Image: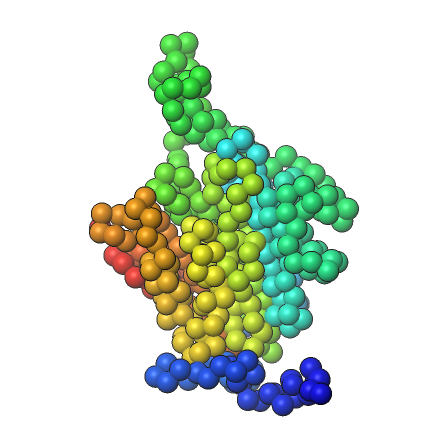
Amino acid sequence: MTTRRDFLRATAGAGAGAAFGIVPSAGLGASAAVHLGRVTPVAVGSGNGRAACARAIEVVQQGGDTLDAVIQGVNIVERDPNDTSVGYGGLPNLDGVVQLDSSVMHGPTRGAGAVASLEGVKTPSLVARDVMRYTNHVLLVGPGAKEFAKSMGYPMENLLTEESRRRWVEWRARLSDRDDYLTPEQSIHGATGFRSEASYGDGLLDSHDGVRPQGTINCNVINANGDLSGVTTTSGLAWKIPGRVGDSPIVGAGLYVDNDVGAAGSTGRGESVIKTVGGHTVVEMMRNGMSPTDACLEALRRIVTFTVEPHLLDEEGRPNFGVNYYAVNKNGEFGGAAIFAGARFAVSVDGDTRLEDSAYLFQRN
Ligand code: GLY
């Protein structure tokens, strides 16, 4: 009988692709699955993740764990009331309730944890890590996730800031002119607006459908030993149907880490990433030898192929929404790509933290 130990020993050194019976495709360049030794630590993630990537690198440089590193990074944004795409201050659902999604993967221990539709906790990434560490499960949702978080000692807090509440109230009033909510323009009673400053869209949010903002943060890191971890965290699609879950907490969609190959995560229209198992697709492309950038582009092409609904297509038959992928391979090579030109991703490497232009499939009209 072949034991697990026999299996791993027999396949050690043969490359991770061989371990899983996958032969790198011809013509795709050197296999990223072959680990070349010491690696320059790199953190890569979404454009709103500059501070997160910088923090992640700081933690791994100090010898910290890779998952602790990326979580400490995204916690900065989760706790920031001024970021309306993630955690505290995230834009709420249809009913004005903030529901958060997050997943984490720890490469060295092959661990995964996630929460979806979690209410009342500013840092869903930490709860996702606790699901991984302290349960026999991978994903907890809704009231179950909340009860679990309470049991682990997280304080229950109101996540709706004055700004996110005002934006929800304004959206509700503008939804229809046949309901009983009045916009300031419709009111004859001296209403002066729902907010004093008009600053919709801060450039960090993708638009799901050209109308509703959607933002997410993804951060992946590799340390000098070549160990990888990743996290994705979001408040999801603004004004979503209560209970809607996007790609961020779905292991294999909004995030995937294989410590033999690399890590990848996504932001943008989650439904499209789920249908094409985006994060996993990017990692499998890297396993087969693609560079991180090419792997991200290939996974985006799948989204284009899978997008056939007329309401999701522009006049040229292209997706009318955004998706971005971010990836780092076992050698510390990294990349990012988006459906449309103009996106950027964050990277921290060699003491420098910056935004780089993402590769893309299409120019915007
Ligand atoms: N990508 C985040 C979401 O769709 O919820």
Q: Nearer the viewer, residue 193 or 208?
A: 208
- Above or below for 184 versus 197: above
For image coordinates 50% across by 33% down, the residue present is: 94
For image coordinates 45% across by 68% down, the residue present is: 282
- Above or below for 71 versus 241: below
Q: Which percent across, then down, holds residue 2?
A: 69, 87
Left or right of 285 in this view: 138: right
The type of colouring in the image is rainbow
For image coordinates 70% across by 39% down, the residue present is: 156
Residue at the front extreme, as displayed: 1
Number of marks drawn: 0
For image coordinates 40% across by 27% down, the residue present is: 175
Q: Nearer the viewer, residue 16 or 76?
A: 16
Residue 243 visible in rendering: yes
Q: Which percent across, then down, holds residue 66?
A: 62, 67
Q: Which percent across, then down, holds residue 151?
A: 77, 46
| Image quarter in which the N terminus is found | bottom right
